[in-house]
Image (cartoon, rainbow, N blue to C red):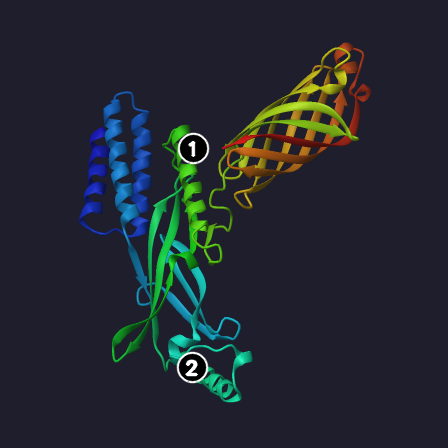
Amino acid sequence: MLKKIIFITVYIFASGCLFAQTPGEYIEYIENLKTQINEVKSDDNVSSRTVRQLRNELSDIYDLFENENFVVKTDNGLKLRIGNYDKEKQGWDVFLEADIAGRKKLFNQKLSLPYSVFTGKKFTPVKRMTSHQKEDYEYSVEIYNELLNNSGIILSAELNYSIKKWAAASEYRFVPHSVVFYESRNGIDKPLFSVGEKNLKHVTFIEKTQVEIRSDYQIKVDYERCASILESEAGIDENSDFQDESEDGNDSLQSGRRVFFGEVEIREKEPVFVRGSLTWGMGRFGFAGATVGYDLTSIDSTAIYDFGLLAGLNMSITKFFRPYVQGAAEIATDNHFTLKASAGLDFKIGYLLFTAAANYNFDWNLTPLINDFVNSSLTDVKREDYVTYSFGMGVTW
């Protein structure tokens, strides 16, 4: 088995060096190698040195992949459609789309070709035009609309991009570097206009089968690296059209809620519980955890504590806001059992977390059942429904 694994990895590494792979082939190689590494790690007959060698080979392939510049053109996969003239943008709408790494329309963007590109004339705001300038402007727009929509002017385009390893397991980031438009004249493509990276959408995507080989520390480092990249890119030009989104339209750093925090639970404007909670992400959207709390109403009597388990779903709206819903089951030392349904919102600043939630509680007092199990029945167990609100702060990662 080991010889087979080493042969496969050497083949992958060699093939990556000898010829340019498509993004889909690179990703397939990488994911297969990660699967092989996990198999080797679980084999007691394989030395740790061998595992390190395989990891080093994976790192080399990542470097090859991330430094590769891929190109797709209108004659081999990039679709281009020209719309009508947009007076507000002073240009013609251009719709581009391409399948990348086996994903339908991963690149899908609307751009604008400026009026001056075709006419060679500097655009003058309509309000400042003379009657003659306005007549000439409207005539030019009409003529070029006709030429563009009836192949009088033949346009082509070229997309230059790369793919980067991203934060989650088997997650990648599509990074478009430029789109160049060409006008074909006498069989020769003449560069017409280009759009830079800051005005093109970056998109993240995740393989259907996620393969994780990183330690918790390595995962944390990758998330910090990606967050730093997003911050630096967002600061390039606050007025640019730069966007970063995931394939399904969500935050590219979407992950299950990982938090440790303390909170105060309030009922009828009075604090009733202080509680500590720890949750751990389960995939991209799920999380589960445990809680321990102290009943503030028991300060002057026998102390009451509760212990609970919870699970829920969350969605990162931006890098600052993360709404969530969760359900919890709690048992208290005064024999109360509570089921709780909650909806809340996290506000994140780096590792710092502020959170608030509304909770609907179904509370059963099990004391009659516990004190006299033989003679009591479920009808003796009383249920009380009530609403509480929670406010807390802690850390997230």
Pick whichever, 309 or 203, lies toward us: 203
Instruction: Answer left or right for 385 relative to 88.
Output: right
Q: Where is residue 53 shown, x and y percent of the image?
A: 23, 30
SS class, disc 2: helix
Instruction: Provide residue 219's location: percent of width, then percent of height.
Output: 41, 33
Residue drawn at x 50%, y 42% as measured from the top left = 254
Q: Residues within 10 Å of mark 2 (few under 14, many from 20)?
A: some
| Observer able to see residue 200 | no
- Foreground pick, 288 / 370: 288
Residue 139 rendering spot, x and y as whole percentages? 47, 86
Query: Which amino acid does the dot numbered 2 rest on?
Result: Tyr
- Residue 43: which quarter of the image? top left
Which residue in the structure is indicated by mark 2? 144
Q: In the figure, 175 relative to 266: above or below?
A: below
Residue 29 left/right relative to 111: left
Q: Residue at x 31, y 51 (%)?
A: 23
Tell me the quarter of the image containing the N terminus: top left
Q: Residue at x 20, y 36 (%)?
A: 7
Q: Amino acid at mark 1?
A: Lys
Find the distance from the CA under tag 2 to the CA under tag 1: 53 Å
Residue 172 visible somewhere in the drawing? yes
Query: Which residue is labeled 1 in the image?
Result: 220
User: Do the residues under discs 2 and 1 have CB atoms within 8 angstroms?
Assistant: no
